[in-house]
């Protein structure tokens, strides 16, 4: 999505939420008395709480997935950087053992 399209979608979502809230204020005056009792308010509050919890779970899963993807890509880049010999060729003799240990550590940590 382009930047302008994202802005338009966000603006439409914001304006629709404001519009529905204002519409709810006007409709509240026309509702029957049984729709405005304490039991009805409790059910609406519980449903709103359920909506908040589900939204929080979805956002948490999305953030966790992004973190895992970043960690996997970061580990892959480090592994590639350590195993590519073009930049490390001048130091080949003295750094082979530490580099091998780091590669082994990265390979074992990837599976866990």
Image (cartoon, rainbow, N blue to C red):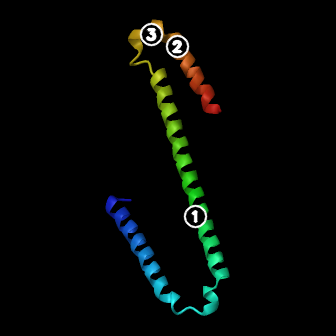
**Please, is residue 66 above or below residue 57 in the view?**
above
Mark 1 / mark 2, whichever is N-terminal: 1
The quadrant where residue 102 appears = top right
Q: Earlier in the sequence, mark 2 or mark 3?
A: 3
Q: Residues within 10 Å of mark 1 (few under 14, many from 20)?
A: few
Left or right: where 2 falls relative to 79: left
Where is residue 88 drawn, in percent x and y?
Answer: 41, 15
Q: Residues within 10 Å of mark 3 (few under 14, many from 20)?
A: few
Which residue corresponds to mark 2? 98
Give the x, y percent position of residue 19: 42, 79
Q: Nearer the viewer, residue 6 or 19?
A: 19
Q: Which residue is mark 3?
A: 92
User: CA–CA distance between discs 1 and 2?
Assistant: 49 Å
In 3D space, how far apart are the residues under numbered discs 1 and 3 (Cα atoms)?
A: 56 Å
x 64%, y 85%: residue: 37
**Outermost left residue:** 4
Question: In front: 82, or 14?
Answer: 14
Tell me the SS state at disc 1: helix
* Disc 2 packing (10 Å; few <14; some 14–19; many ≥20): few
Q: Identify the disc placed on residue 87.
A: none
Q: Position of residue 57 (x, y in %)?
A: 60, 56
In the image, what residue occupies the spot 53% across and 49% down? 63
Mark 2 to mark 3 CA distance (whole Å): 11 Å
Q: Is residue 99 above or below residue 12?
A: above
Q: Dot 2: what SS?
A: helix
In the figure, 28 relative to 88: above or below?
A: below
**Callout in the foreground (2, 3):** 2
């Amino acid at each position: 999505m382009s930047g302008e399209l994202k802005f338009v979608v966000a603006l439409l979502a914001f304006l629709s939420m404001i519009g529905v809230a204002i519409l709810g204020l006007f409709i509240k005056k026309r509702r029957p008395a049984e729709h405005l009792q304490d039991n009805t308010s409790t059910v609406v509050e519980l449903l709103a709480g359920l909506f908040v919890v589900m939204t929080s779970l979805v956002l948490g899963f999305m953030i966790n997935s992004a973190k895992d993807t970043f960690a996997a890509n970061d580990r892959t880049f480090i592994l590639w950087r350590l195993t590519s010999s073009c930049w490390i060729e001048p130091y080949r003799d003295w750094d082979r053992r530490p580099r091998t240990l780091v590669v082994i550590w990265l390979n074992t940590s990837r599976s866990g």
